[in-house]
Image (spheres, rainbow, N blue to C red):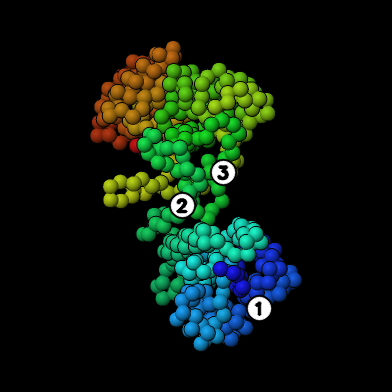
Amino acid sequence: MKIERALISVYDKTGVAEFARTLASMGIEIVSTGGTAKLLRESGVKVRDVSDLTGWPEMLGGRVKTLHPKVHGGILFQRGKAEDQREISQHAIQPIDLVAVNLYPFSATAARPDVTAEELIENIDIGGPAMVRSAAKNFQSVGVITDPADYAPVAKELRETGVLSQGLRLDLARKAFARTARYDGEIATELERLTANGKVAIGTLEKLPHRLHVALERREAMRYGENPHQAAALYVAAGRAAAGFAAAKQLQGKELSYNNLVDLDSAWALAMEFGRPAAAIIKHNNPCGAAEQESLRDAYVKALACDPVSAFGGVVAFNRVVDAATAGELAKLFVECVAAPGYEAAAIEQLSSKKNLRLIDMPREEAPAELELKRIAGGVLVQEPDRHELKESDLKVATERAPTAAEMRAMIFAWIVCKHVKSNAIVFARDGATVGIGAGQMSRIDSVKIAERKAAEAGLSLDGSVMASDAFFPFSDCVEAAGNAGATAIIQPGGSVRDADSIASANKLGLAMVFTGARHFRH
């Protein structure tokens, strides 16, 4: 279809003048509205006002300007259908072959802390989505642009062929319907903030809305999922700036797999918990070592010492720029992936010989906290992310002996790591480093025994260590096992009907034990 007339009405005016100028140079008539028309004229583009096309002025403070049969008829009539052709001729409706529209910034307005109910309502675009949907429905005859990034491919195709291919029009229509669907979802969610007790006003948006609209777009396909027979892809929040691993840069190595990204996400989340230089080593979505020390190299060495066997083929995350000394230690072990907020040139040079090692340069900005979704048969479970931060003032000493300052520091460190270990989770730690981890067992005492065995296999003593448990002890056996293994202090949530038994065992063994009042189950 030859493009003879284009309607351009955009809020985001990025690149629109250049695009309109390109269309005009091809003899395409430009029809526009309000601020867009003003900008185009100031840029030297000949523009026809939409009010001239419709014969009606903009009205109601701009609420009505394109809601007219001469706009929607010109977009929606089916080219080649005799009856449609007869009707548009009868009513003097002129064809509109290309629609470039983007919408009022509803989400940006809603995100303002001082937004009023009136502003929220007035930033609900009506005419824009209506034109977008009309053009997208009639994609076999009309092109629709909702993203300034699409100006270039549309202009390129028009310059090269004089027309828009059906394939491009269909791609643009898919994108347009996805945009209006996301826009309506954003509005539906934000309107839950409005109260209407005699007066419409802004209230508080619930943490878990009644209607949850999740709009995702595919960023890249994976070779496969957890297993080769499962298809997989990385999806990101549509319409938002890339964040987290979606915004990371891969500096070298093979492409990332589904399992790589799952493990990297766990490693990165753990490493970023700490203020001092820290390293986290993850294998099959569980930590096999973590440490925070005065230097990044020492943190990595301490983390690796916890379970060097399991660390083979794992992923590593750092919360500091990787330096040459740390890279030198990394180079001694087979590691699948490394994530860090940067790498010194000398570190990259040292690791460049490991061609398959994926080096991921993470963005410095923290990714926004999102609701966590888990699909079950017939529904989706939704929860807030576990952002609980333990303060020393939150702790309740349950035993006769209070912990020393060193034990307290070690317990808080162990508690942080425990949060990232699959339940039932047990972590032994000392001097800012894990020395034994037991994860994912059906019985908590089994996790204690595994942590003891892992420490022994690594040649580490548990003497003088502390033990963290992600949930309370149903029996005193875990306390007894910890004390007999050499631990001197225990941190746990408390709250069991048998807490008195655990406290009595701790007192008998001379252990200090504190209750957090919060648990960290991770399934």
Quarter residue 49 falls in: bottom right
SS for dot 2: strand
- Picture layout, residue 58 above or below residue 372: below
Residue occupied by mark 1: 48
Q: Kindly identify which numbered label has been placed on residue 6.
A: none
Q: Amino acid at mark 2?
A: Leu
Q: Amino acid at mark 3?
A: Ala
What's the residue at 45%, 81% (across, down)?
Answer: 83
What's the residue at 46%, 18% (across, down)?
Answer: 308
Q: CA distance from mark 3 to mark 1?
A: 41 Å
SS for dot 1: strand
- Picture layout, residue 190 above or below residue 208: below
Q: Amino acid at mark 1?
A: Arg
Residue occupied by mark 3: 247
What's the residue at 30%, 36% (across, down)?
Answer: 495
Q: Is residue 477 visible?
A: yes
- Picture layout, residue 450 above or below residue 248: above
Residue occupied by mark 2: 216
Which marked residue is nearer to the observer: mark 2 or mark 1? 1
Q: CA distance from mark 2 to mark 1?
A: 37 Å
Sequence order check: which comes first, mark 3 or mark 1?
Answer: 1
Q: Position of residue 466 (x, y in %)?
A: 42, 23
SS for dot 3: loop
Question: Circle 3: is it few (<14), some (14-19), or many (20+) Cα within 10 Å?
Answer: some
Question: Circle 2: is it few (<14), some (14-19), or many (20+) Cα within 10 Å?
Answer: some
